[in-house]
Image: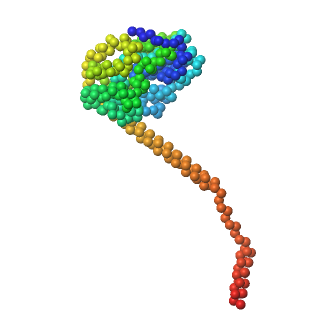
Amino acid sequence: MKITPASPPDATRAGDVENSWILPEQKIMFVSIGKNACTSIKWLLAEISGQDVGRILSADSLQSTQRMLIHRRQSWRDTPKLTQVDDATRAAISPGNGWFVFAVVRDPRLRAFSAWQSKFLVGDPSYSGRKYVGRDWLPRTPETARDVLEDWEKFVGALERGRDRGGISTGDGHFAPHTARLSEAVVPYSRIYDMSEIGQLTGDLAAHLVATVGSSPELTLARENDTPLKAGREVFAGGLLERLETIYASDFERFGDLWAASSATTMERPVGWTPDALRDIAARRAINEHVAALDAKLTARGRRIKELNRRNAELQERLDALTQRPQPVPPRPEPAWYARAVRGGKRAARRAITR
């Protein structure tokens, strides 16, 4: 089912859209939504735009794997976002002007479960180890499927509470509704794809490149940032399905017909999680916990260095003040004739006393 975007003719009014990736030479713009193949798509766009892969993979950033470093904007060259270009450039970004502007959506129930695994169940260091460290709804290392399901239900409760009440904000890019991240009112989409239409996306992208720059490499989306557990009926049992539909009501109002048939199949099948899948989660958590511990040590060391530098600057100021203070002038030595006169005077005084 093709999604018809409710979009303006160009990006003139899209100056506040942060989650946008612009390839000016190829006339491509991608609006990224977390856990909707965005890691794979960014690697594809990096290939298309000739990014320096070595630079991307060598960046210092808190990620669980090198491949996740693709999300670090500072490592990209000549790939601005809409907030970084001027009005004239935004006005030129339009399908009518030969641009290919796209995004990908996904059933938010499946997306939320996938994002929870990626950011919390396997212990992503930036989420479990930094943003939400110590929260009582963080999952344990699971030993059974029941452990997973109990901790998943806690997380759905955290989504419902929101960050102000100790939960997690649905403003977070991995858990925000599509309707909040797409910015359809200001972004001029060529097409919005469902996850089931990834093959159509790569075909359309290749055709666009041929029309724009004359050729296209073979476009294949690699499987990136995968999650160990597939969703099934147990994941949405006990009222969780309805609770998620309430959290993401705006998505279902906008795109609900798109997911009705495909999601029904997922909701009916049992999860069938194997012991190997649970061991995979434990292994990923062990790696991520080690990364988080190293990050904590580096952060503490950085704070200590900063404090020592501050103290050193204070001591240097005090030293400079002391060396610039006027020093007392030492007394001048008395001339030799003065000493002889004093000795002579003393002798004369002794003779006078004796007489």
* Residue 25, picture quadrant: top right
As rendered, which of 343 and 39 lies closer to the eye? 343
Tag count: 0
- 196 left or right, relative to 53: left
Point out the image quarter for the N terminus.
top left
x, y percent for residue 323 = 62, 55
Q: Measuring 44% from the left and 28% from the top, which residue is drawn there?
A: 69
x, y percent for residue 40 = 42, 21
x, y percent for residue 326 = 65, 57
x, y percent for residue 160 = 36, 25
* Residue 154, picture quadrant: top left
- 255 left or right, relative to 229: right
* Residue 236, picture quadrant: top left
Looking at the image, residue 32 lies above or below residue 325: above
As rendered, which of 71 and 51 lies closer to the eye? 71
Q: How is the image coloured?
A: rainbow
- Residue furthest to the bottom: 355
Point out the image quarter for the C terminus.
bottom right
Q: Measuring 38% from the left and 35% from the top, which residue is drawn there?
A: 133
Residue 164 seen in render? yes
Q: Measuring 73% from the left and 78% from the top, which residue is drawn there?
A: 341
Residue 25 seen in render? no
